[in-house]
Amino acid sequence: MKKYTYTEKKDTRSGFGAGLHEAGKKNENVVALCADLVGSLKMDAFIKDFPERFTQVGIAEANMIGIAAGMTIGGKIPFTGTFANFSTGRVYDQIRQSVAYSNKNVKICASHAGLTLGEDGATHQILEDIGLMKMLPGMVVINPCDYNQTKAATMAIAEYEGPVYLRFGRPVIPVFTDPDQKFEIGKAWMVNEGTDVTIIATGHMVWKAIEAGEKLAELGIDAEIINIHTIKPLDDEAILTSVKKTGCVVTCEEHNKFGGLGESVARLLTTELPTPQEFVATNDTFGESGTPDQLMSKYGLDAVNIVEAVQKVIGRKK
Amino acid sequence: MKHTIKELEDIASQIRRDIVRMVHGCQSGHPGASLGCADFFTALYFEVLNHKTDFTMEGAGEDLFFLSNGHISPVWYSTLAHAGYFDKSELATFRKLDSRLQGHPTTHEHLPGIRIASGSLGQGLSVAIGAALAKKLNGDKSYIFALLGDGELQEGQNWEAAMFAPFNKVDHLIASVDYNGQQIDGPTSKVLALDDLQAKFEAFGWHVINTDGNDMQAIVEGLHYAKTLTGKGKPILNLMSTQMGAGVDYMTGSHKWHGTAPNDEQLAAALAQLPETLGDY
Ligand SMILES: Cc1ncc(C[n+]2csc(CCOP(=O)(O)OP(=O)(O)O)c2C)c(N)n1
């Protein structure tokens, strides 16, 4: 198992804030909008340097999406910011009609996704957003795994033409990817090469997959770990190549197993290469209040759960 | 009056103590507007509302209350506990794992007193209208109360509801606005000004009254007066001026305490200003 270390922990939302600031410096068409959550979205640096390119819309997410769509018509590249729940479910039809169907260059940037939002509880912890967004034709869906990757992804989507959903979170987690990485939309990152099982992880679950990989190595299981940061378009080739070698797969996401990354992988595999698969994901449930760690444990999203899923799926190999 | 004003103020003091202790206990949550609305909740549950603590979802023959700005759950939970819906010891579980006292109110854990989830802003007025329509269909003449945040009024759904209620003569509805002039990113006047809310609601067909939400006498009288205005074809809007953080000097009047928990020292300073009147949980 390749050794991953980290010297600091940071929140992915801060990676977004830093990436937005960089994107703003690079391209004056980059504009930002926020719905009364500037601090939570870490937009301060952008606002300080480009106050005239920032729009505070108030607590009015539907209006924000519509305004963002309209701004693209004047050549702007709007980044909207609010919590993941209010970025998706709250404004689904506004996104569907004015952004996705109209093919507008809006970047929907969503913080506080998943259980790791913690104490606010289920009203704020969306576990369905990947599904909602990946179902929209033409929508790119990205869920980066640490601060550096989120920063790189934010800069990359500014250069991509078309609607994007960028999902990130609130907790501080290890920073373990390259600070100077080039982020390629739709291109999987090989975290660790292995032969016994393919672990496919996204977002906060990537670090957990690495922890699981280390435990599995101790048990004599050689896990291949792939980071799928772009859930749509999916890197079919990377997944198929790996699964041909390992013969089984475990998908890991901080999301409902209904409609998430796991289902995208299953769809690919059933049509191309039927393979035993296990899902580490929430199981058709809402979240609740608690600390992020408590919730990840209660809802089965820890490294131990990945280890168990791997043992189970290996047992199912022919 | 069921209580004297002094008695009500004492209850509010205890509720304020609970709020800061609850938010401190889990180091998260929203003390600012919870404190600001402590007098309103006290007046409502201990003086105005016709309700049974033996909770049923339908609440037939009872007045119903809906909290749209669900983030101020601490004030509601404390009020419900002191009113007798559940034991106050449960307040210690606020926002903790496996608690019925979720960060934002929910029906999911069946906490007595809660009839709908809230937390995602802007939805409560519609729900209150729906409950009022059902009461009307059932021939139940009880009142429906709702509380909304002022920043929350930036959500468009409120204005859909605001248009619907007068047109459909939903006139047993008394909606109060926590008019504290603050939201997360700053004063509401700087984020997205609400301007003349009274004129806006009147233009939509509401009967608007103004009360001081941090003056117990005024809020009790205001809510009783609001009741006398019902049944005349118009919904009632109570524009209730409050101070975010009211009752704790260093929290008063600033959006900084919208959603920040006090540390140990700050907790002590807050409690020193709030007499323990009914016993801490
Ligand atoms: C739909 C939605 N958007 C954003 C939020 C995040 N949020 C929680 S409270 C709040 C500010 C609410 O302002 P106000 O209604 O004035 O309440 P106060 O600040 O007085 O507590 C925001 C933006 C939310 N809970 N729901």
Image (cartoon, coloured by chain):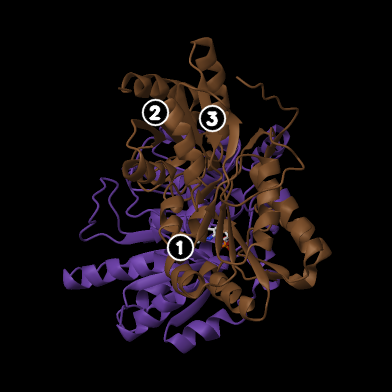
Chain colours: A brown, B purple
Q: Mark 1 points at which residue?
A: A90
Horizontal side of B199 relative to B168 (left or right) equals right
Mark 3 and mark 1 residues within 8 Å of each other at the beta carbon: no
- Residue nearest the viewer, comparing A210 with B173: A210
Graded by Cα atoms within 10 Å as few (under 14), some (14 to 19) or many (20 or more), the crowding at tag 2 reads many
Mark 3 and mark 1 lie on one chain; the one further toward the N terminus is 1
Graded by Cα atoms within 10 Å as few (under 14), some (14 to 19) or many (20 or more), the crowding at tag 3 reads many
Q: Residue furthest bottom?
A: B203
Q: Which mark, by number, is residue A225?
A: 3
Mark 1 and mark 2 lie on one chain; the one further toward the N terminus is 1
User: CA separation, marks 3 and 1?
Assistant: 34 Å
- Disc 1 within 8 angstroms of ligand 1 (CB): yes
Q: Name the residue under label 2.
A: A248
Q: Which amino acid does label 3 sit on?
A: Ile
The image quadrant where one finds ligand 1 is bottom right
Q: What residue type is labelled 1?
A: Arg
